[in-house]
Structure formats: C-alpha cells, structure tokens
Amino acid sequence: MATVIPLKPAQGPTASAVRLTDIAIEFRIKGRPPYKAVAPTSLAVADGEFVAIVGPTGCGKSTLLNAVAGLLKPAAGKVEVYGQALAGLNAEAGYLFQQDAVMPWKTALDNVAIALEIKGVGREDALGAARDWLGRVGLGRFLDRYPHQLSGGQRKRVGLAQVLIRQPKILLMDEPFGPLDAQTRQIMGSLLLDLWAGDRKAVLFVTHDLEEAIALSDRVLIMSAGPEARIIGDHRIDLARPRDAADIRTHPRFHDIHKAIWGQLRAEVIKTYGEEA
Amino acid sequence: MSRAGLLSLQILVGVVLLLIWHVGATIPIFGYTLLPKFFFSTPIDVASRVVQMFAGGKIWGHLYVTLLETVLAFAIGALGGIAIGFWFARKPLAAAVFDPYLKMVNALPRVVLAPIFMLWLGLGIWSKVALGVTLVFFIVFFNVYQGVKEVSPVVLANARMMGMNERQLFRHVYWPSALSWMFSSLHTSVGFALVGAVVGEYLGASAGLGYLIHQAEGVFDTTGVFAGMVVLAGFVLVVDWVVTLVENRLLHWRPQSAAAQA
C-alpha cells in the first residue's frame, strides 16, 4: 500500500511525433561569414498528423527536413522525436527524397526487399513483403525492372514502397513529386493519401506547390523567404477526409483556403525574386 | 546501310589491302619489287605459316603461357586496385599522403620496369605478370576510387535513412558503384594486362607469343614475325569478345546507351 507509483510526464502517445524548438541552421562557407539558412524557428507535428511546409524556392524547407531526419545537425535548438532528443539519424523516420534515391543496380523488387533484409528479415519473407508493397503502389507487373527501365513516376512508387515497407512512424517527404508531370503528381498524391489513411503516420511534407499542400494535409505551414527563413504561418485545413487529391481541388472550401494562404505566400515569393533581381 | 552491305564493304577493304600486299610483294613493276619479300613476306606465306603453327600444335603452349600471364596480371592488378582504391576513397588522409608517389609511379613508362622485374623474378612468367600488374593496377585503382567517391549522395543518404550500417553500405552501395566503374574500363585493363605479358615476353622469355615474335625477328624470319602478329591479333579479338560477354552479364542493370558509350 505504501508505494506510490509516480505519474510519468505526459509523454508517449500524447507527445508530438516531431518537435523542433528554436532550430537554427547555418552553412559554413570558407572565408565568409556562415550563411544563416534557417533562423530560430519552432514547429510540432502531432502523431498521425499530415503537415505540409510550403515556401518559396531555396527558402530552406529541405534543410529543415534534413534536420528532422538527422542528416544535418542544427547550429542551435532542439529536435525531439516522440519526446526523445534526436541523436544521429532519425530511426523512426522514413525519408522520400526529391531526386531518385533507389539503387540503380537493384531491381524494383530487390530495392524494396533490401529495406527489410538489412534489418535481419529472411530473404524469402522480405521478397514476399516487397511483392505485396509493390502491388499496393501499383507496380505489381514491374517487379524485375531496373530503375532505368521505369518512368519517373514509377521510380517514385518504388521509392515510396521502399520507405513504407519499413513501417516508419514518421514520414518525411521532400518535394517527392516535384520532378513529375502535373497529372502524375495528382495520381501520386491520391495514392499517398490512400496508403496514409491505412495507418495515419505523422507526415512532414515539403513542397512549393500550395495546391498540393492543401489537397493533402491537415496543416499547412508557410516558410518565409531565406536567408534566416522561419515559419510565419500555420493554417489548419478543415477539408473532410477521406479526400481525393484530385477532386478536392474543385471544392469551394478549397478555393477559400487557397485564397487565404496564397496572400501570405505570395509576399514571400515576391521577396525571393526581388532579392535575386 | 544494311548489315549485309556493311559487312561486304568491310570484307572488301580487307581483300583490297591483302591484294596490294600480295601484288607489291610478288609482281615486279618496271623490274622493281615494291614490297620485297625479305622485309614484307607475302600474305599467302603468312597464312600458310599460321596454319602450320596450329597444325604442328606448338602454338598452343605459347598461347597458354600468354593467356596465363594475362589472367594473372589482371587478377592481381585488379585486386590491388580495388583494395587500394577503396582504402583511399574512404580515408582521404591516406590518399593525400600517397598521392605524389602514385602520380610519380603512374607517370613512369612501365616498359623501363621490365629489366628490373626480370632481375628480380627471372625469365619465367612472373616477371611478365609483374609488368602487367603495374599497368592494370592504376586503371582499376583510379576507376574504383572514382566509383566510391562518386556514389550519388542521395542514394547514400537514402541507404543511411533505411538503416544500413557501414558494412551494409559497403556491400549494397559502395561496392556495386565501384564495380560498375571498374567494369566500364574492363576492355582497357584487360588489354593492358595483355600488353604487359607480350612486351615482357618480347624482352626476355622462353615461351609465349611475344617470345615467338622475338625469336622470328632474331633470324630475320619476316614471315614468322607476321604470323605471330596475326595469331596475337586473333587472340586479342577472342579475349575482347569474352570481356564483352562478361560485361553484358555484370552490367545488365545499366541503360544500354550508357553501357555502349563506356
């Protein structure tokens, strides 16, 4: 009767999946003062939340994402993943890169299976799971193709399966559909939403396409023009789910939201070009 | 142009060249032989000598020796190049320290090393292997070094995020990348292994194609020299064909156009 179990601090499931506190990122350039890419800024992504970061080109969106991934060490501030300070690479996160990141010397099937094999899953089980995942992203007929034999959109699907097969708790996406044509982007967006609806991971999605951001996410964060970029806007997107990434764009509410956010974003885009001119 | 048309043109060029050689060597023009037999032999003599060599069966031993030297030179040179290439690419300090010495050795015309190898290793196959190794090593080394250095940073970051440790990165990322660079220079490096073997044999040996040519030259047997050259050319073509087969087998993941350009 005497022992009183102390209450644990409010962590675990209620803690944010990702929390950045006063993050600043600098790049050292020889013989010049360091370039301050990101000024002290904060953001949080709740568990199961789909958050998009939108900003003008070169504002440091990807840099911020790399800090969350642990690929880049911030000059100041704190990165926390489920309440734990991040040390080294973010093991909870799967990262879908903007450029092609699949291994060109492996077939689609091997590229996806390897993500499990390196964790010690047996070859046959890994291949089975990889077949399953490639089927889910619509590549069931292209298992034995090498990346160069696939289209840009198909390579992205391989990348998506490669990330999702590991069942990461957090998904980091850096303009993943950027290099694709407009139609393929919408199809990939719908595919992503379908897959995400299954287990609702926390997603941090970087894009320069505001429409894409609104169509996919629960919250849209606006980043200011660099240098010393920071988050200057936080907009909740109250469009009903499940959504279709293509159809939602014709919804009247979509236009209202777009109009409200675009006003803020436009000022930053103009600033970027003003400085370059 | 159609395949057959191209082939017939290619054959035509060969026939015309052989014809000029034959006529120049056998038919005097205004009492003057353009290509004296003593210096140029004739295509028919050379051809019959080649047939004799194979019919007599002596040539096989020489071919075997040259092939053995080539294979050993390639294998040892490639292993060394891969090991050192990886080491330097992963440890920039080592690369920086050894850089001037590597440049120096690579700048040296390798033929001048032949006498010293002969002194150290004798007239047997190993002095020729050593000469070939010095040629092969640098080609493989530079390519593996580039291959490891030029792994796409995105592929690497992706593999890291996937959770690969250093050993797995080596096996699934660095190694395939380095191999693709090495194999793209396979024709050159195998060719150089053969050059090392033949030049070594030419400078002093008791067997091999280079030795055969040198022997014929020593007794002013022009026909023998030409016959040796013909056999050597055929041998190189066969080796090159095998290399192409190996290359297609190992680099099948690469786009055709890029593989063809390399």
Image: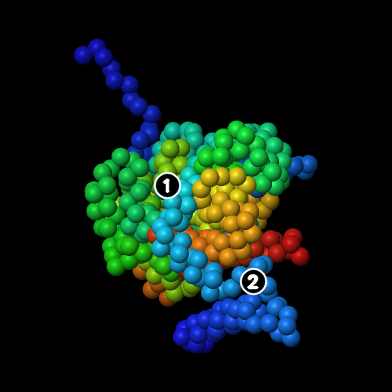
Residue at x 26%, y 14% (from the top left corner)? A3
Q: Which mark is residue B37?
A: 2
Q: Secondary structure at mark 2?
A: helix
A83 on left or right of A267: left
N-terminal-most mark, 2 or 1:
2
| B80 left or right, relative to A160 | right
Residue at image position (59%, 73%) is B42
Q: Residue at x 33, y 66 (%)?
A: A142
Residues marked 2 and 1, same chain: yes
Residue A132 in the image, given as x and y percentages of width and height? 26, 58
**What percent of the width, then of the height, locates residue A73?**
57, 38
Q: In front of the other: label 2 or label 1?
A: 2
**Which label belongs to residue B172?**
1
Quadrant holding the C terminus of chain A: bottom right
- Residue A37 position (above or below residue A189): above
Q: Is residue B135 visible?
A: no
Circle 2 residues within 10 Å: few <14, some 14–19, many ≥20: some
At 28% across and 43% down in the image, what residue appears? A121
Residue B54 locus on image (x, y percent)? 43, 62
- Please give the label number shown on residue B155: none
- SS for dot 1: helix
